[in-house]
Amino acid sequence: MKLESQWGISYPMLVSLSHAKEQYKAGMPFKADFDEFVRGLLFYSEMLFDYHGETYEVFLKGNEKTDIIVFCCAEFQQEYNSEKEFREHANIYGKLLKDIWDDVHDPRYM
């Protein structure tokens, strides 16, 4: 519970315990929502997910005070200077990541 209250994740899972309980009660598989994925990124520093058969990577580059968030796959690389900028602008061919999150599969840490 300490990691959930501090980071919003339940190690070693990305899904917080409270969210996992909701998904379990609804008969849904455990899947991190977009906020949990971003919190996982800030905790683990490297994340992956699949979308339409392609694997995408997100990782922190730099040091704690000047981290840049890199979002990439075989076809592109995007860099963001803040968590807020990543949340608002990360996209896959013009579709905002936050808007297509329901279609993302297997969000995970590396």
Image (cartoon, helix red, strand yellow):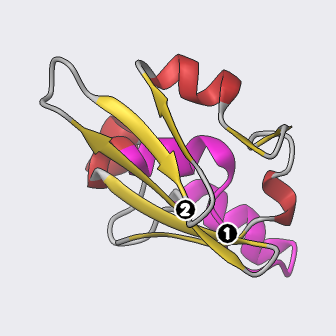
The residue sitting at 40% across, 35% down in the picture is: 69
> Which residue is depicted at the point 12% across and 30% down?
63
| Magenta segment | 17-41
Q: Quadrant of residue 109?
A: bottom left
**Sequence-first tag of 1 and 2:** 2
Q: Is residue 110 visible?
A: yes
Task: Inspect the image, locate mark 1, and give the three-letter code of the amino acid beneath it.
Answer: Lys
Q: Residue at the location (15% across, 27% down)?
A: 64
**Residue appearing at x 85%, y 50% in the figure:** 100
Residue 108 screen position, x and y as percent: 49, 70
Q: On the picture, is 32 further left or further right than 83?
A: right
The answer for how far apart the CA atoms under marks 1 and 2 are is 6 Å
Residue type pointed to by label 2: Val
For disc 2, the marked residue is 15
The reply to whether callout 1 and callout 2 are in contact (CB within 8 Å) is yes
Query: Considering depth in this image, is 53 or 16 the residue closer to the camera?
Result: 53
**In the rendered image of this protein, does residue 5 appear above or below residue 86?**
below
Q: Secondary structure at mark 1?
A: loop
Front one among 57 and 99: 57
Quarter of the C terminus within the rendering: bottom left
10 Å crowding of disc 2: few (<14), some (14-19), many (20+) = many
How far from the left and from the top, in percent, is residue 57? Answer: 48, 60
User: Relative to 79, is 59 on the left or the right?
Assistant: left
Q: Residues within 10 Å of mark 1 (few under 14, many from 20)?
A: many
Q: Main secondary structure of the magenta part?
A: helix
**Residue 1 visible in the displayed image:** no
- Above or below, 58 against 97 in this view is below
**Residue for badge 1:** 31
Say how many tags the image has: 2
